[in-house]
Amino acid sequence: MAHIDVTDIQYFLSDGTQLLGGVTFKVTAGSKTALIGPNGTGKTTLFKIIAGDLKADEGSINRTGTLGIMRQFVGQVRDESTVKDLLLSTAAPALAQAAAKVAEYEAKMLTSEDEKVHMRYAEAIIEWGDAGGYELETTWDKVCMAALGVGFDKAGDRLARTLSGGEQKRLVLEALFEGNDELLLLDEPDNYLDVPGKRWLEDTMSRSNKTVLFISHDRELLNNAATRIVTLEPGHGGATAWVHGGAFGSYVEARKERNERFEELRKRWDEEHAKLKELVNMYKTKAAFRSDMANRYQAATTRLEKFLEAGPPQAIPLEQNVNMRLKGGRTAKRAVVAEKLELTNLMKPFDAEIWFGDRVGVLGSNGSGKSHFLRLLASGGTDPEREHLP
């Protein structure tokens, strides 16, 4: 079974700031381990170090099992990549290389009648088959049907940017969980997914026998799918890790109790520090008048130095102070008026009125037009009717 050992990982930013200050934890075989922490503590950086995309300044990563990765960019593809390219991003390097070779010689055959080019293409096709490409295409067909409702033969050449963010996520997640990799790294897999998609992810992750390390801010996913939680705790010397061996339901209380223990240990350390300093000052004063006090003064000084060298207990983790202010109540003014609004091929015409002060959630399945609708509002909508002019 696959596992990951993360040992004393330290990482410095280009300006010399220490981002990770000795991160250590284990992802045990078969576990669903969530990596959480405040924004900016280094979750994605640590993810990249584990994936092999970045090199740590200190420490080591040891892992077993084949590795499948979903990186943070999934859901944001806006280039000329196709659905096939997106699926290949989840494939083993040997398969990705074989696919690239097939694509290269397919392109050359369009402009060349050279027999050597045709021979190279034939060889590339054989290599693709030998690497397991045709078996993979069978899996991709199943994946495309589940995520997009059509087979790989119809979806493979479709531009990935024509998919919604949720459809891109679902496609890659389906491929990873259907694939043969024993260890999965998932960077915010729940982003962009609609409610049914989130429920599917929770259920799939819980039922899977794969070892999964994932980053998430979604409390429902953490509570319903995670079996262990690793928290990156920010500190003045970079982030460190704390492991909670349970789901999110018991996490908040466990973290509170942990911080209270740190607070008590720090209080005792400060009290002992004050006593030692007082003792040193007392013997220093006496030694100025009595020579027999010199040895006691030196012993007290040595004791204080060793105490300070050992250092204080772990500091209480820094807390984020996040506040949100939403002002304004319902008035007699309408902020948004939709009359027979239709987004072609996405949603049927509908009417709606949104008043100042309303808090409105826009729900719908992936690809149904939620983002298109919000972008329309963000750009000012359409020209209002005279009665709605300010």
Image (cartoon, grey):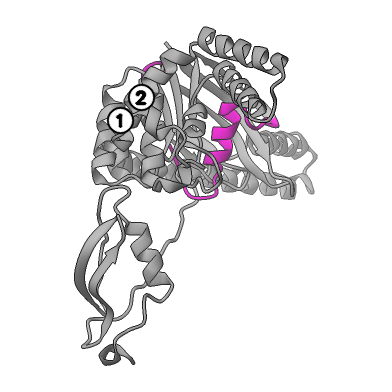
Exactly how many numbered labels are in the figure? 2
Give the distance between the C-alpha atoms of the residues marked 1 and 2, in whole angstroms.
6 Å
The amino acid at mark 2 is Asp
Please give the name of the residue rendered at 76% of the width and 44% of the height, measured from the top-left corner: 287
Q: Residue 11, position in %: x, y?
A: 66, 37
Q: Which residues are magenta?
A: 28-57
Say whether residue 244 is visible: no
**Labelled pair 1, 2 in contact (Cβ < 8 Å):** yes
User: What secondary structure is found at the residue carrying circle 2?
Assistant: helix
Q: What is the x, y in percent for residue 31? A: 36, 22
Q: Is residue 270 above or below residue 337?
A: above
Q: Closer to the camera, 310 or 365? A: 365
| Quadrant housing the C terminus | bottom left
Tell me, for residue 145, which label it has, or none: 1
262 relative to 41 in the view: left or right:
left
Q: Amino acid at mark 1?
A: Met
Q: Position of residue 185 (x, y in %)?
A: 47, 29
Q: Nearer the viewer, residue 366 or 123?
A: 123
Residue 137 occupies quadrant: top left
